[in-house]
Amino acid sequence: MSETIHIVKVGIADMNVVRAPNLIRTSGLGSCVGVVIFDVMKEVAGLAHVMLPDSSLARSKIMNPAKYADTAVEALIKLVLEAGGRKGMLKAKIAGGAQMFSFPSQSSDMMRIGARNVEAVKWQLNRFRIPIVAEDVGGSSGRTIEFNPQTGMLSIRTVNHGIKEI
């Protein structure tokens, strides 16, 4: 009897966790960064779709932790550990952080949201001592990513570039 494989979808500024044989997917990664934290031996993985680098950008008191790199990474680690992941065994893969629009003055830091998201996610992962084992970041195209906690493979479909696995 084969078990049904479910694909858990993660929306923008959202996060979730899965156990094998299920897969986890997010689409619409432009300047956003998809962060996958996983324990391949326990076949568990979490995915966050991070929109912005820093929760200090939040405009209201009610804050969505999945939206910001500084709060999403920590919350995602907690979810993965609660689902059976082991602290010393966690690894990460990241994708996204594209520069979706070109502006005449690229020097404006506010317009570098993709690059700033990537930097913020990397800083947080480093802070929690979680190694990034693979990444597909930057560029100017949107991505859809799907992670398999059983194989540890991240499948990335990039607009106009096809599919690759990291």
Image (spheres, rainbow, N blue to C red):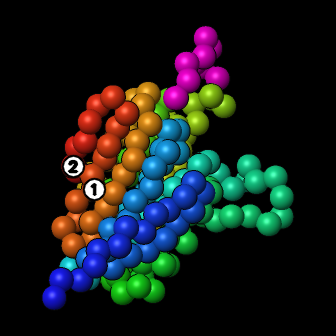
Residue type, mark 1 in image: Leu
- Residue at the image position 28 percent from the left and 79 percent from the top: 4
Q: Is residue 166 left or right of residue 114?
A: left
Q: Where is residue 91? Give x, y as percent.
A: 31, 66
Quadrant of the image containing the N terminus: bottom left
Judge from the rendering whether residue 55 lies leftward or rightward of residue 76; answer left or right.
Answer: right
* Residue 101 lies in the magenta stretch: yes
For residue 54, say whether it is visible. Answer: yes
Amino acid under disc 2: Glu
Span highlighted in magenta in the image: 100-108
Percent position of residue 160, x then y: 33, 28
Residue that sits furthest to the right in the current view? 60
Q: Are marks 2 and 1 in contact (CB under 8 Å)?
A: yes
Among numbered discs 2 and 1, the one appearing first in the sequence: 1
Residue at the spot x=62%, y=28% of the render? 111
- Element marked by disc 1: strand
Tell me: 149 left or right of 70: left
Give residue 25's quadrant in the image.
Answer: bottom left
Relative depth, front residue between 23 and 94:
23
Disc 2 marks which residue?
Answer: 165
Q: Which mark is residue 154?
A: 1
In the rendered image of this protein, does residue 134 appear above or below residue 31? below
Residue 39, visible in the rendered structure: no
Position of residue 51 measured from the top left corner of the image (x, y, whole percent)? 59, 49
Instruction: Using a 10 Å C-alpha cutoff, classify the residue at mark 2 as few (fewer than 14 neighbours), some (14 to 19) or many (20 or more).
Output: few
Horizontal relation, residue 154 to residue 143: left or right = left
Residue 158 rendering spot, x and y as whole percentages: 34, 37
Sort mark 1 into few (<14), some (14-19) or many (20+) by Cα contacts within 10 Å: many
Residue in the picture at 41% in, 85% down: 83
Q: CA distance from mark 2 to mark 1?
A: 5 Å
What is the chief secondary structure element of the magenta stretch? loop
